[in-house]
Amino acid sequence: TKEEYWKVASVEGYPRPTRSIPVVQLYLGRALALVKIDQVSNSGAKSAVTSFTFSATTAGRNRLLVVATDTNDVTQSDRTIRTITYGGKTLTKISSSDAGNTIANRTEMWRLINPPTGSNTVAVTLDGGSCTDALGAAVSFINADQGIPINASNTNDTSATSATISITTTVDDTYLLDSISTNADSIVPGSDQGQQWNVVIGSDSGAGSSRGPVSIGTY
């Protein structure tokens, strides 16, 4: 979700779960050099939590950290994220997609420009009571634009056979990243996407994939 910055996300070709799938996507652009993913980590499955932590690592120049969360709970506030910090620094929310209380899946994306280097703690705090199932994933990028690293995002909530989402890039050499939350126990990204995390969390799953760098166009 960026122009000459990056691109975060495009969900193409995920198989259909038995319930709706909330999806978040964005695109980022580049700085002076080609933007790329440096490190990826995730929290693993978390159950009955009001908060949780995991480690992530950032390095290099022109850094950007994107944290995605996948949650499931029948109460919206319990599956909604209140705050995320990395190394004590507060992240800014990019976007979210929610399937509603019947389906109860939700995914969000947050970002931090110029995060502290090295291995630090990602701390996720939920907005309500105990969340039934939760997952966090952190993706660190290098060579990201430090002014406006994410210029666009898109969301979708679908019960179609495949979960798809589209986004239009406005500059070359951008990057796509997506996050999906579903009750399906098997998630396979499209053939042109690289899987970055895929974790079963209780009766649900959370996953994310990337694609890039890509040229100007709609994906």
Image: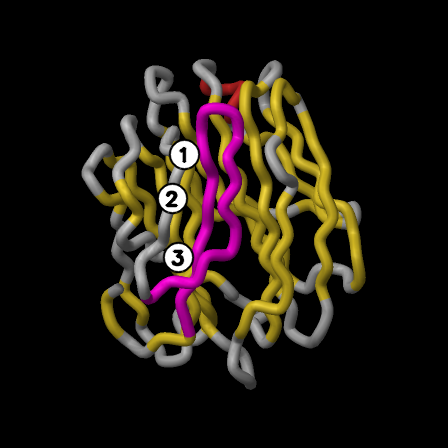
Question: In whole angstroms, how far apart are the C-alphas of marks 2 and 3?
Answer: 16 Å
What's the amino acid at mark 2? Ile
Alpha-carbon neighbours of circle 3 within 10 Å: few (<14), some, or many (≥20)? many
On screen, 115 above or below 86?
below
Question: In whole angstroms, how far apart are the C-alphas of marks 2 and 1?
Answer: 7 Å
Q: Which residue is mark 2?
A: 187
Label annotation for residue 117:
none
Q: Report the quarter where the N terminus lies.
A: bottom left
Label annotation for residue 185:
1
On screen, 191 above or below 96?
below
Q: Hey, which quadrant is residue 9 in on the image?
A: bottom left
Give whichever of 167, 159 is nearer the camera. 159
Q: Secondary structure at mark 3?
A: loop
Q: What residue range appears in magenta?
A: 192-212
Position of 198 with respect to 100 (left or right) is: right
Residue at the spot 28% in from the left edge and 43% down from the top edge:
15
